[in-house]
Image (cartoon, rainbow, N blue to C red):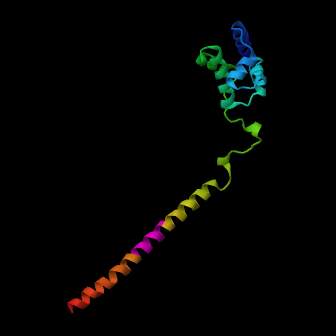
Amino acid sequence: MGSFGENLRREREMRGVTIEEIASSTKINPRLLRAIEADDFSQLPGGIFTRSFVRAYAAYLGLDEERVMAEFQLVAPPEDLDVHRLGVTKRVSSQPGGARAGAVSAGVAVLLLIGGYALYRRAHRAAEWPAAKAAASAEA
Protein backbone atom coordinates (compact mmCIF):
# COMPACT_ATOMS: atom_id res chain seq x y z
CA MET A 1 0.00 0.00 0.00
CA GLY A 2 1.37 3.42 -0.97
CA SER A 3 1.44 6.69 0.86
CA PHE A 4 -1.55 8.99 1.21
CA GLY A 5 -0.61 11.10 -1.81
CA GLU A 6 0.27 8.06 -3.93
CA ASN A 7 -3.16 6.59 -3.23
CA LEU A 8 -4.86 9.79 -4.37
CA ARG A 9 -2.71 9.96 -7.50
CA ARG A 10 -3.49 6.31 -8.31
CA GLU A 11 -7.24 6.96 -7.90
CA ARG A 12 -6.98 10.03 -10.13
CA GLU A 13 -5.08 8.14 -12.83
CA MET A 14 -7.51 5.19 -12.71
CA ARG A 15 -10.34 7.64 -13.43
CA GLY A 16 -8.38 9.24 -16.26
CA VAL A 17 -8.46 12.69 -14.67
CA THR A 18 -5.62 15.20 -14.97
CA ILE A 19 -4.34 17.56 -12.28
CA GLU A 20 -5.39 20.47 -14.51
CA GLU A 21 -8.99 19.21 -14.69
CA ILE A 22 -9.20 19.05 -10.89
CA ALA A 23 -7.53 22.46 -10.58
CA SER A 24 -9.95 24.01 -13.05
CA SER A 25 -13.00 22.60 -11.28
CA THR A 26 -11.91 23.15 -7.67
CA LYS A 27 -9.98 26.41 -8.24
CA ILE A 28 -7.03 24.92 -6.37
CA ASN A 29 -3.59 25.71 -7.77
CA PRO A 30 -2.15 22.67 -9.61
CA ARG A 31 1.13 23.15 -7.68
CA LEU A 32 -0.79 22.54 -4.44
CA LEU A 33 -2.53 19.46 -5.84
CA ARG A 34 0.85 18.05 -6.87
CA ALA A 35 2.15 18.77 -3.35
CA ILE A 36 -0.74 16.74 -1.91
CA GLU A 37 0.06 13.83 -4.23
CA ALA A 38 3.74 14.04 -3.26
CA ASP A 39 2.93 14.17 0.48
CA ASP A 40 4.82 17.47 0.56
CA PHE A 41 2.56 19.19 3.08
CA SER A 42 5.13 21.89 3.79
CA GLN A 43 4.16 23.47 0.44
CA LEU A 44 0.53 23.80 1.55
CA PRO A 45 -0.92 26.73 3.53
CA GLY A 46 -1.87 24.50 6.46
CA GLY A 47 -4.84 24.26 8.78
CA ILE A 48 -8.34 24.41 7.41
CA PHE A 49 -7.11 25.38 3.94
CA THR A 50 -5.16 22.16 3.46
CA ARG A 51 -8.03 20.09 4.82
CA SER A 52 -10.48 21.78 2.46
CA PHE A 53 -8.12 21.17 -0.49
CA VAL A 54 -7.90 17.47 0.35
CA ARG A 55 -11.67 17.28 0.81
CA ALA A 56 -12.32 19.00 -2.54
CA TYR A 57 -9.82 16.69 -4.27
CA ALA A 58 -11.56 13.62 -2.83
CA ALA A 59 -15.02 14.93 -3.71
CA TYR A 60 -13.98 15.62 -7.30
CA LEU A 61 -12.77 12.03 -7.66
CA GLY A 62 -15.97 10.72 -6.07
CA LEU A 63 -14.15 9.22 -3.10
CA ASP A 64 -15.57 8.93 0.41
CA GLU A 65 -14.51 12.30 1.81
CA GLU A 66 -14.68 11.22 5.45
CA ARG A 67 -12.47 8.20 4.82
CA VAL A 68 -9.95 10.31 2.91
CA MET A 69 -9.94 12.95 5.66
CA ALA A 70 -9.38 10.28 8.32
CA GLU A 71 -6.41 8.95 6.33
CA PHE A 72 -5.09 12.48 5.86
CA GLN A 73 -5.24 13.21 9.59
CA LEU A 74 -3.16 10.10 10.25
CA VAL A 75 -0.33 11.33 8.02
CA ALA A 76 -0.70 15.07 8.75
CA PRO A 77 -2.28 15.84 12.14
CA PRO A 78 -4.29 19.08 12.08
CA GLU A 79 -2.39 22.25 12.91
CA ASP A 80 -4.96 25.05 12.86
CA LEU A 81 -2.48 27.59 14.17
CA ASP A 82 1.18 27.00 13.55
CA VAL A 83 2.66 29.61 15.89
CA HIS A 84 6.23 28.99 14.74
CA ARG A 85 5.27 29.74 11.12
CA LEU A 86 3.77 33.06 12.19
CA GLY A 87 6.85 34.08 14.16
CA VAL A 88 4.88 34.53 17.38
CA THR A 89 6.76 33.50 20.49
CA LYS A 90 4.26 34.32 23.28
CA ARG A 91 0.64 33.51 23.80
CA VAL A 92 -1.66 36.49 24.11
CA SER A 93 -3.04 35.38 27.48
CA SER A 94 0.44 35.30 29.03
CA GLN A 95 1.03 39.03 28.68
CA PRO A 96 1.98 40.68 31.97
CA GLY A 97 -0.74 42.78 33.54
CA GLY A 98 -3.55 40.99 31.71
CA ALA A 99 -5.45 40.11 34.90
CA ARG A 100 -4.80 43.54 36.38
CA ALA A 101 -6.16 45.27 33.29
CA GLY A 102 -9.36 43.22 33.59
CA ALA A 103 -9.75 44.15 37.25
CA VAL A 104 -9.18 47.83 36.50
CA SER A 105 -11.78 47.72 33.72
CA ALA A 106 -14.31 46.08 36.04
CA GLY A 107 -13.60 48.68 38.75
CA VAL A 108 -14.13 51.56 36.30
CA ALA A 109 -17.40 50.01 35.13
CA VAL A 110 -18.65 49.72 38.74
CA LEU A 111 -17.71 53.34 39.48
CA LEU A 112 -19.53 54.53 36.35
CA LEU A 113 -22.65 52.60 37.37
CA ILE A 114 -22.58 54.05 40.90
CA GLY A 115 -22.02 57.57 39.58
CA GLY A 116 -24.83 57.19 37.06
CA TYR A 117 -27.21 55.96 39.74
CA ALA A 118 -26.25 58.86 42.06
CA LEU A 119 -26.93 61.39 39.29
CA TYR A 120 -30.25 59.73 38.51
CA ARG A 121 -31.35 59.88 42.16
CA ARG A 122 -30.22 63.49 42.54
CA ALA A 123 -32.14 64.55 39.42
CA HIS A 124 -35.33 62.88 40.70
CA ARG A 125 -34.98 64.39 44.17
CA ALA A 126 -34.57 67.86 42.65
CA ALA A 127 -37.75 67.30 40.61
CA GLU A 128 -39.66 66.06 43.69
CA TRP A 129 -38.48 68.84 46.01
CA PRO A 130 -40.49 71.74 44.45
CA ALA A 131 -43.60 69.53 44.45
CA ALA A 132 -43.10 68.66 48.12
CA LYS A 133 -42.47 72.33 48.98
CA ALA A 134 -45.66 73.37 47.18
CA ALA A 135 -47.68 70.71 49.01
CA ALA A 136 -46.29 71.84 52.38
CA SER A 137 -47.13 75.49 51.74
CA ALA A 138 -50.64 74.55 50.61
CA GLU A 139 -51.26 72.82 53.94
CA ALA A 140 -50.15 75.84 55.93
Query: Which quadrant holds residue 73?
Result: top right
Q: Position of residue 85 (x, y in %)?
A: 76, 36
Query: Which quadrant holds residue 47?
Result: top right
Front residue (pair 55, 1) = 55
Front residue (pair 4, 14) = 14
Vertical side of 98 occupied by 63: above or below:
above
Where's the N terminus, which quadrant?
top right
Residue at (70%, 26%) from the top-left corner?
A: 27
Q: Is residue 119 magenta?
A: yes
Vertical side of 69 occupied by 7: above or below:
above
Q: Is residue 126 left or right of residue 95?
A: left
Q: Main secondary structure of the magenta part?
A: helix
Q: Is residue 106 left or right of residue 133?
A: right
Q: Is residue 11 left or right of residue 31?
A: left
- Counting every numbered tag in the picture gives 0
Q: Position of residue 18 (x, y in %)?
A: 74, 14
Quick check: can you spot residue 77? no
Where's the C terminus, which quadrant?
bottom left
Vertical side of 117 occupied by 74: above or below:
above
- Numbered range of the magenta stretch: 113-121
Farthest residue toward the bottom? 140
Query: Which quadrant holds residue 19?
Result: top right
Quick check: can you spot residue 83? yes
Q: Is residue 125 magenta?
A: no
Vertical side of 94 occupied by 101: above or below:
below
Q: Position of residue 92 (x, y in %)?
A: 67, 47
Residue at (61%, 58%) from the top-left corner?
A: 101
Q: Position of residue 40 (x, y in %)?
A: 78, 22
